[in-house]
Image (cartoon, rainbow, N blue to C red):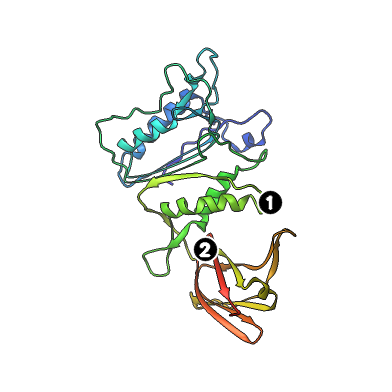
Amino acid sequence: MGSVDLLVSCPPGDTLTASLPPAHIEPTIENIRDAFQSWAARCAAHQDNIALLYFCGHGLQGDGQYLLASDFNRYSAAPFTQAFDFDETRLALQQSGPRTQLYVVDACRDSCLERPHGGVPGLAVRDFFKANVCENELTIRLPAFDQAQTERHEVSRLTRALIRSLEGQAATPGELQDSWEVRTDGVRRSIRHLLAEGLGEGGSYRAVEATGFGDVPLYRLDGPPLAKLTVRCLPPEAAGRTKLACVPQHPPDLPTVDCGTAQERGTDEQSIQEWRVELTSGFYTVNAHCDSTTVSRPHSVWPPHSRLHMQVVT
């Protein structure tokens, strides 16, 4: 990254403060506005810059999404003086910022029951008569009127899913031969699955709002990422008699993966036998041997998760 501005607030007794510079900046509304102004100017200095705005904290949903500064409710008569409208901020930056803009808001969107008197301003003001310069945008946040979930002192679930997507679980084959790259559209497609996967089989599915336009590469990986493959047999009762193997076709220098026999998944009431393997992303021939018959299927394995149903008995 070319430059990073960090504003962070820690609760009393939090050990994170030990790893921060002594003069770290508290995210009060005044400091947020000052940092945003200088950051937005740097972003707009070159049209090929990539602007990334990440907010993790408290929020409410009114006419827009209101994000709360660390000194929110400093003046009880006008508590929203220490808040800003994220949607107005995003729309304004589309008119002045670089061509590629990314926004991640890891905050609740509980309903704001009382309309703030005079509204909540953004960090910038949009011009209704000015055209947008932004050509690629990705916004990731929770759905309206939803609540963020995490464990105390742990990275939030949405941020964990985002990190995994950027580490390669949102990657797709690039335009160059044998290249893999993380693109904005790949993050948009994968984030919902990664969030649900992070909750495990016993967790309830949590939606995520991933919107935007355009598609642009963010960076290229050094090699193909790992990806998960789930295979099920048709008919399901043949799974116990079937052995599975994945033969790599591209990249061709990888060894054949012997997946063995299927494993029982699910609950006693709803269980199924299937194979779950982790492979290097690429193209494979999947061989299923049942009784005296072998069935082969070509299949591409891309992150975060590929699925395949194989008819092993007719």
Q: Which label belongs to residue 22? A: none
Q: Nearer the viewer, residue 214 or 271?
A: 271
Q: Position of residue 172 (x, y in %)?
A: 44, 61
Measure the alpha-carbon separation of dots 1 and 2: 27 Å
Q: Residue at x 51, y 39 (%)?
A: 143
Q: Which label belongs to residue 202? A: 1
The reply to whether residue 283 is in sight is no
Which amino acid is tagged 1? Gly
The relative height of residue 271 versus residue 248 in the rendered view (above or below) is: above
Q: Are marks 1 and 2 in contact (CB under 8 Å)?
A: no
| Screen quadrant of the C terminus | bottom right
Q: Residue at x 67, y 40 (%)?
A: 151
Q: Residue at x 48, y 65 (%)?
A: 223
Q: Nearer the viewer, residue 269 or 260?
A: 269
Q: Residue furthest bottom?
A: 292
The reply to whether residue 46 is in sight is yes
Q: Secondary structure at mark 2?
A: loop
Residue 47, by quadrant, is top left
Q: Position of residue 295 (x, y in %)?
A: 56, 81
Q: Which label belongs to residue 225? A: 2
Q: Position of residue 62 (x, y in %)?
A: 47, 27
Q: Residues within 10 Å of mark 1 (few under 14, many from 20)?
A: few
Which amino acid is tagged 2? Pro
